[in-house]
Image: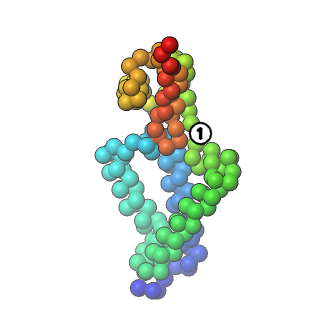
Amino acid sequence: MFDLSMSPWEFVVRAVVVFLFLLFMLRLGGKKHIGELTPFDLVVLLIVSETVQGSLIGDDISLIGGLLASGTLFVLIFVVNYASWRSKNAERLFEGVPKILVRNGQVRRLALMQERITRSELIEALRREGCTSLSRVRFAVLETDGTITVGLRCNR
């Protein structure tokens, strides 16, 4: 239970590598998927967690090994959060930047394409905000958490 099959530093290095890999893959996946977990996304998330478990601790089933790996992950989360709070560059690196999808009623097709958002998904998000016409949209922004913020023109 307390005997390690590898050095403590190997647990730390493994945890860092897995953390950075998963962070990179999540950023590569796009913001849309962070805010909206479909059943498919949940299944993928569960499978990924199972597959990286072996990468974190290898064949080691000791209590100390699991605590070292998970402790390292918590430290990394703290470091990323702190760096994002202190530095705009780190925040952009780890969390991304908001993306304008609609400006003054005009859909920015390139932005939709880059974020892999269909026009029907955009229209659905606009309807959720009470907008029934693109001409009423001053802006629609895909936030870093995957939500879409909509600003409507005032009726005069």
On the image, the x and y values in percent for residue 60 come to 44, 77
Residue 80 shows in this picture:
yes
Please determine whether, in this image, residue 38 is positioned above or below residue 127.
below
Residue at horizontal 50 percent and vertical 19 percent from the top: 154
Image x and y of residue 40, in percent: 32, 45
From this view, report whether residue 71 is shown above or below residue 118. Answer: below
Q: Amino acid at mark 1?
A: Val
Q: Nearer the viewer, residue 132 or 108?
A: 132
The type of colouring in the image is rainbow
Q: Residue at x 69, y 51 (%)?
A: 87
The 10 Å Cα crowd at callout 1, few under 14, some 14 to 19, many 20 or more, is some
The number of discs equals 1
Can you give x and y, in whole percent of width and height, for residue 57 in the image?
A: 46, 71
**Residue drawn at x 51%, y 27% as measured from the top left:** 151
Image quarter of residue 52:
bottom left
From the top left corner, tell me how far across and down residue 150 is, in percent: 48, 29
- Say which of 65 and 94 sits in front: 94
Query: In this view of the protein, which residue sits in the foreground, 3 or 38?
Result: 38
Toward the left, the furthest residue is 39
Q: Determine the residue positioned at 57% across, 46% down.
A: 95
Picture layout, residue 5 above or below residue 96: below
